[in-house]
Image: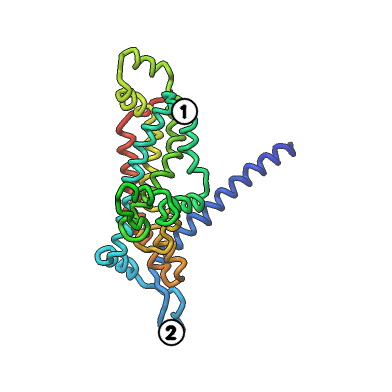
Amino acid sequence: MFSKVRFKKNLFVWGMLAYTVLHFIIFWFYVNIETIALSFQRVGVDITDPDTFGKTVWAGLTQYKAVFNNLANSKETQRTLLNSIGYLPVTLLELFMSVTFSYFLYKKMPLAGMFRVIYFLPSIIPIVVLTFVYRFVFDPSYGLIPPILKGMGMNVPNFFGTYPTNQIMVYLYCLWVGLGYNIILLSGAISRIPIEVMEYGQLDGISKSRELFSIVVPLVWPTITTTVIIACTSVCTVMLQPLMITPSDSTTNTIALTIYNGVLAGEGKLPYLSAFGLCITVVAVPMILLVRKLMECAFRDISF
């Protein structure tokens, strides 16, 4: 028997499923297949050959050879990889600080609520505003930091001028901004720990550091695992931070920013960028999966 209510419900469900499947086919399947195909092509640059000029033609492994050649010989490409890999220890340091700060906030340290707002505030302010303020603080003419350094008798460096100082400043920005997001995640996970577990440890007379590393960390390990995996993916995805902080300096390029700038440069670089991105993916994905497996083996997942 036909039911109008049931028909509308099924129509809604199939509509939502159709949108999801269509989104997957277009923005994942099609884009990735097109990227793989493009990596085996090149754009004709010979103006005397109207059949190939400005068109993509089959080129075999030419683009992959160019990628490996640049990885071996190009100082710019090597620096780009080092810059990107550098974000991993920065995010791991950020994670360690986030766990520590979250624990002290959980222990109701004085002004804990205010500090929680201070830590999280950079995460909700647009990156354009944050980077502008960050650069302004270190400005030699108007900033807050240079006069302090001068008053201490120290030389004021050109913070955003030359490598590697400019890259270190980008790392510091990421460390500052990233704390808030992780603290919110970890604070929520720590607050779910049964108070009885904490009281049992206190009855045994364990220290704060023992409580943190022997009780809190194992119980919130799934959340820590998630943040570590996100940190690993940041090696391939960081782009806006160096783009906003050092917009005209290629020495702070990352993998994602190199691809972004290459796309803006013109269609002729797309085949090379496709091969470059695929080579990075082939190396990065197994490493991230390995890290995830090792993290999951460190502590047994406990439900509470």
**Which residue is labeled 1 in the image?**
111
- Residue beneath the point at 46% across and 28% down: 111
Return the residue found at the far top. Answer: 203
Q: Quick one: quadrant of the N terminus?
A: top right
Kind of residue at disc 2: Ile
Query: Relative to residue 195, is residue 154 depicted above or below?
Result: below
Q: Is residue 282 visible?
A: no
Residue 39 pos. (x, y %)? 39, 66
Of the 4 image quadrants, the one containing the C terminus is top left
Depth check, front residue: 255 or 291: 255
Single out the mark in the foreground, 2 or 1: 1
Where does the image place residue 118, in percent across and percent down from the top left? 47, 37
Mark drawn on residue 47: 2
With respect to residue 79, does 226 lie above or below? above
**Numbered mark located on residue 52 in the image:** none
Q: Count neighbours of disc 1 (C-alpha within 10 A) and say few if under 14, some if 14 to 19, many if 20 or more.
A: few
Find numbered disc 1 in the image and state the secondary structure of the residue it sits on. loop
Q: How is the image coloured?
A: rainbow
Residue at far bottom of view: 48
**Quadrant location of residue 293?**
top left
Q: In the rendered view, would you say 175 is above or below 201?
A: below
Q: Residues within 10 Å of mark 2 (few under 14, many from 20)?
A: few
Q: Is residue 218 visible?
A: yes
Tell me which numbered mark, 2 or 1, is placed earlier along the sequence: 2
Q: For residue 254, which quarter of the picture?
A: bottom left
Q: Mark 2 to mark 1: distance in Å?
A: 69 Å
Mark 2: which secondary structure? Answer: loop
Residue 154, horizontal then vertical, whole percent = 30, 50
Indicate whether 158 appears above or below 195. below
Spot the residue most to the left. Answer: 72
In front here: 82 or 145? 145
**Amino acid type at image mark 1:** Leu
